[in-house]
Amino acid sequence: RSLDLAVIPGDGIGPEVVAQALRVLQTVASSSDIDLAQREYPLGADHWRATGETLTEDTMHALRQHDAILFGAVGADPRSTDIPSGLIEREMLLKLRFSFDHYINLRPSKLLPGATSPLSNPGEIDFVVVREGTEGPYVGNGGRLRADTDQEIATEVSLNTAHGVERLVRYAFELAQTRRKKLTLIHKTNVLVNAGKLYSRYFNAIAAEYRDVQTDYLHIDAATIFMTTDPARFDVIVTDNLFGDIITDQAGAITGGIGYAASGNINASGEFPSMFEPVHGSAPDIAGQNIANPTAAILAVALLLKHRGFEAEGAKIEQAVEKDLAQHIGETRSTDAIGDDIIAVLTGE
Amino acid sequence: RSLDLAVIPGDGIGPEVVAQALRVLQTVASSSDIDLAQREYPLGADHWRATGETLTEDTMHALRQHDAILFGAVGADPRSTDIPSGLIEREMLLKLRFSFDHYINLRPSKLLPGATSPLSNPGEIDFVVVREGTEGPYVGNGGRLRADTDQEIATEVSLNTAHGVERLVRYAFELAQTRRKKLTLIHKTNVLVNAGKLYSRYFNAIAAEYRDVQTDYLHIDAATIFMTTDPARFDVIVTDNLFGDIITDQAGAITGGIGYAASGNINASGEFPSMFEPVHGSAPDIAGQNIANPTAAILAVALLLKHRGFEAEGAKIEQAVEKDLAQHIGETRSTDAIGDDIIAVLTGE
Ligand SMILES: CC(C)[C@H](C(=O)O)[C@@H](O)C(=O)O
Ligand SMILES: CC(C)[C@H](C(=O)O)[C@@H](O)C(=O)O
């Protein structure tokens, strides 16, 4: 059994949290006889500064050969002004998602024992958001007429296809069947009527094929209310690219912070390598201080392993993370120390 | 001094909460010598069922003659299938906002003493969202190609104009100057680059004219995190139509429920009547039971009075609501009873 990984540590705290995630992965791989190969790609803001490049065709071609990609975080320090805002995010993260057809952006949310929710009555939060990853308002389709004048018109076009929505919704129903069998569609069908109709049409049609899955619908605005007052009501959520972006950050917040939120950018058809990353960004303000929480990156490795068929190994990491958290409630630990502690749980030391 | 009001009670709990709001208004008007005229417009789902009409040209013309509009809530019971989903909302609420150029959608959020936040550590929540009301993804510009086939493409076009953004941002800076002098722009500039540039351009340019106002920027996803972990950080928020829709529902939730959230749809140029409404919807599931909370509708009347220059009278209602809430912590009261109690505070009985 082998696993050939591309690793993109990226910017800011990316390399720090990825280092711990790789240590954990190596620990599990050697104890489970996984033949692990990995190649690091030094991409991101510094690479752009040095070369003017984000992702070349050559790099894309090389990345494509791997079984999966582990991604840290990219994004320049907003205090630096030499890189246009959002450029690295779009030309790296979004380019990878779109080029490798990562149409399932999978984002589990669980209130781990030992994590502190800012909600006074969180209940048992344990849901997965199935966010669309390759279309919607993220397609970069829009423009500026009379730019920079007082007659400017700026547009953003959300593109939604039957192809994209059908495979997304089907994946979500499949996932719901393996869980508590409840699926919620989140959209804004009363205002975004065209995209809304497309989502509703497939949601209702596919629901008829999965009669054991209970379904409901929430507008995105109402969904933020339930996320606050009764997040335990959710099992699987299916939603578009932008609403998924918004609701998963809120989900991270109510489960104790995005230091625990991992995600998979999945090409479920298997044509391209899938990519796993913490939901958090490059956090330049705390970079280089050995204080970033590597848990989300470590959980991203767990998702990666499960995706590549190493179910038991992925579960082992998740259990080790939960155990570690419960053992260190309220402690402030360094990035390294959290890595050490989780490895200690894994090796039973 | 006079006030000529159009009243649209609407559907579901709309008429119930509006009835109490009008009682409160009458109480304040008679004790303050405001010459109050009001005309009721029986519009909404039932009117559509009876006539097939939402808002005719004649009705629009009649509404336009009033000083202001008090709006309850519209929206058909989702269990009824005779009205297409969202039709009443779009053809009534959105039509009024767009036709009467309600470019400022003003939504104050305050954790009132006596209200219970679902956050364990809410802090002193007291901010106002200045939401754009006449453009963005709400313009109804989009379509369906190959509709209802497996090759469907559905689009939604967000239109943003210099005209719309400039007046919005300027209003927000003016408002911030009368408060704690802090203004946050919420957008998604790293992905929605065209609209994002337009918002950032006016935000930065106008900031230079209001040097006493401290500014910052948050992506909408990050904003939902701060709304959970540190909502007291916000003073005035300025944002687009869709992000404003989402963040104000979350704001309602963290301040104890949208039973307390009022909003103004304001045509600040004074060309058209402004419209005031509770943020909540028609809530058909609890309609007709005399259990809906009329507080948001009553606070909408306070906003309306202030907007029409009756500052002292508006403040009086706000104070009465706060006092009433503090006197009845944790009590379950009927719709009528809350109206009675607030009137009792106002009349000092
Ligand atoms: C960095 C940004 C482009 C990205 C997104 O909006 O998808 C991030 O917020 C995320 O959720 O992964
Ligand atoms: C009913 C709906 C069209 C409306 C909106 O999206 O603006 C509502 O959610 C609101 O916030 O007033």
Image: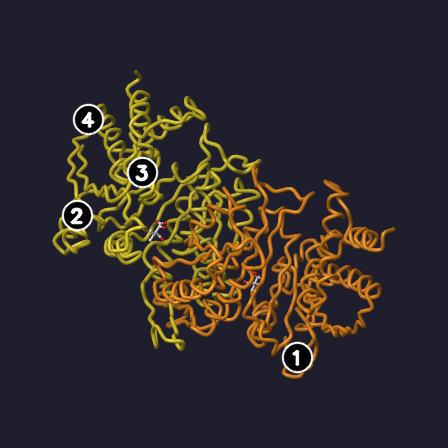
Chain colours: A yellow, B orange
Question: What residue does disc 4 label?
Answer: A33
Question: What residue does disc 3 label?
Answer: A300
Q: Residues within 10 Å of mark 4 (few under 14, many from 20)?
A: few
Task: Say what secondary structure mark 3 lies in.
Answer: helix
Query: Given the image, on which type of amino acid does mark 4 rest?
Result: Asp
- Host chain of mark 3: A
Q: Residue furthest top?
A: A349
State the count of labels: 4
In whole angstroms, how far apart are the C-alphas of marks 1 and 4?
A: 76 Å
Mark 2–mark 4 contact, CB under 8 Å? Answer: no
Q: Which mark is residue B64?
A: 1
Label 2 vs label 4, nearer the camera: 2
Q: Residue at x 45, y 48 (%)?
A: A237
In the image, the residue with mark 3 has its CB under 8 Å from the nearest atom of ligand 1: no
> In terms of sequence position, does the residue under pointer 2 or pointer 4 come before the other?
4
In whole angstroms, how far apart are the C-alphas of marks 2 and 4?
A: 24 Å
Estimate the x, y position of residue B142 in percent, counting from the top left: 42, 72
Q: Quadrant of residue A260?
A: top left
Query: Given the image, on which type of amino acid does mark 1 rest?
Result: Arg
Q: Residues within 10 Å of mark 3 (few under 14, many from 20)?
A: many
